[in-house]
Image: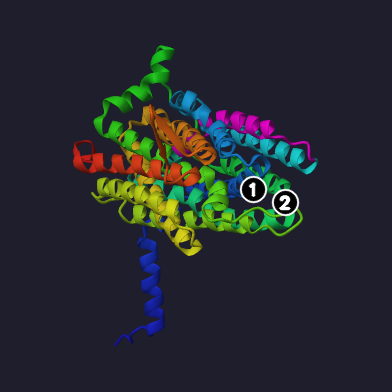
Amino acid sequence: MVEPSPPNQATQRTLRNRLEDSNIYRVFGFSDFRLLWIGAFLSFTGSQVQNIAQGYFVYRLTQDESKLAFVSFCSSIAVFLFGFLAGSFADAFNKRVVLIVTQVIFAIGAFYLAVATYYRFVQYWQIALVALLLGLVSAIEMPTRQSIVSRVVPPEVLPLAVPVNALTFNVARILGPAIGAMILINFGVAMCYLLNGISFLALIWAAAAIKANLRSHPREPQPIGDLLMEGFLYTMREKRLKTLFFLETITAACGLAYLAMLPAYVHQVMGIGFVAANAPDPSKSVLGYCYTAVGIGAITGLLLVTQYAESRHKAAIIRYSMWTIGIGLFILSLVRLPALVYLTMVFMGAASVAQLNTTNALFQLMSPERLRGRVIAMHIWAINGLSPFGVILFGWVAMQSRINNNIRVGALQFTLPTSGVSLSMELGGLCVIAGALAASLSKQGLAELP
């Protein structure tokens, strides 16, 4: 007669079996994926540390929403100009070499700003110029890094690997702002830049340590125009990809512009003003809490995406996410209570990540291997390439309406009920809701998703 296992051993065995069957455990079973994940996570955490410090620093330096938005515009405009072309680098060159070289350039930019800030010769135009140059590098780096995922896991695991890989950025969005706010309060902006520069070493180490073959696939010679445009043409000719592309463009350009203006939002809408330079500044902590709330929501959204990675509910996730973002922007434009602001940002962070990462996985699943880097570049182009125009537009609206909220149409003059960042959020929310309504009424473009 076999004695039954003690309850605690049975419980431990059950928990271990559940863990081994979980989606995340399956993906992390691949050593190359673990290396890529850890390197990207550390690098992204450093970038979030810099983002919170730079946004605070630029807005305090200029007191201008449009200039705050312009820095974000500079960091993304290169993706608009070259993003759908830069995917050819991801397909044509050794991904390991491209990833290492781009991380070295990122580190140089962060170290320069650290020195310039510490020795007090930094000016606004220098921050904008560095953002512009590093944005050009990002246009090449992002499709390269994302296309590596399909090299370090087998095809049947790819739908799970994409959202788990996105955890790197979104876990960093929780830890990075919290760490960044602490460093900003205690050590200043220059230290945040310095730590970001050091963090790029992690992804350099990961790229060098990955054992998978990251060389480009051999291909037949083809005209350079076809090579550069093939990813764009493939996306526009595939109706489902085209629909996904336009929906995420609306979300990125109109629904996420508020992230670039959070320092102004904390000051204008939440009513937390600046203090003397040598006094404790509560806006630093509140800004960190806002970014952290978005990050907590992002993790929640990724868990949802991972749970339904192999389901047929992807279209519903995209539609409901857009509704949540649009309504959330209206709520943010009206409330001042911090607890309600943070809760709304949690929901919006979850919704934005759910939509964009579901779309990312679909782009990878519906693109052939030989075009994957270029098709993913179209996804990145929608998020980071077209969004700067939304950021610069809504930043300009916020500044102009704050200066003068009267509109004249012929002989009639109207006074806007809201102005500044609140007005830009309401307009952005209206655009996203319109996109969500279109997606809900016309479901053909989201039919039969894998």
- Identify the residue at image location x=80%, y=41%: 119
Judged left or right of residue 192, residue 333 is left
Magenta span: chief secondary structure: helix
Residue beneath the point at 41% across and 11% down: 223
Determine which quarter of the picture holds residue 149: top left
Q: Which residue is mark 1?
A: 53
Question: Residue 106, relative to residue 93: is it above or below?
Answer: below
Q: What amino acid is labelled 1 in the image?
A: Ala
Q: Residue at x 63, y 47 (%)?
A: 56
Indicate the amino acid at tag 2. Answer: Gly
* Residue that badge 2 annotates: 188
Residue furthest to the top in view is 223
* Position of residue 123 measured from the top left corner of the image (x, y, whole percent): 72, 34
Residue 171 sits above or below residue 130 on the image: below
Alpha carbon distance from label 2 to label 1: 8 Å
Answer with left or right where residue 115 lies relative to residue 242: right
Quadrant containing the C terminus in the rendered view: top left
- 16 relative to 329, above or below: below
Judged from the image, the secondary structure of the residue bearing numbered disc 1 is helix
Circle 2: element type:
loop
Q: Position of residue 48 (x, y in %)?
A: 58, 48
Q: Position of residue 394 (x, y in %)?
A: 47, 37
* Residue contact between numbered discs 2 and 1, judged by CB atoms under 8 Å: no
Considering depth in this image, is 145 or 378 the residue closer to the camera? 378
From where the camera sits, is residue 186 visible? Answer: yes
Q: Earlier in the sequence, mark 2 or mark 1?
A: 1
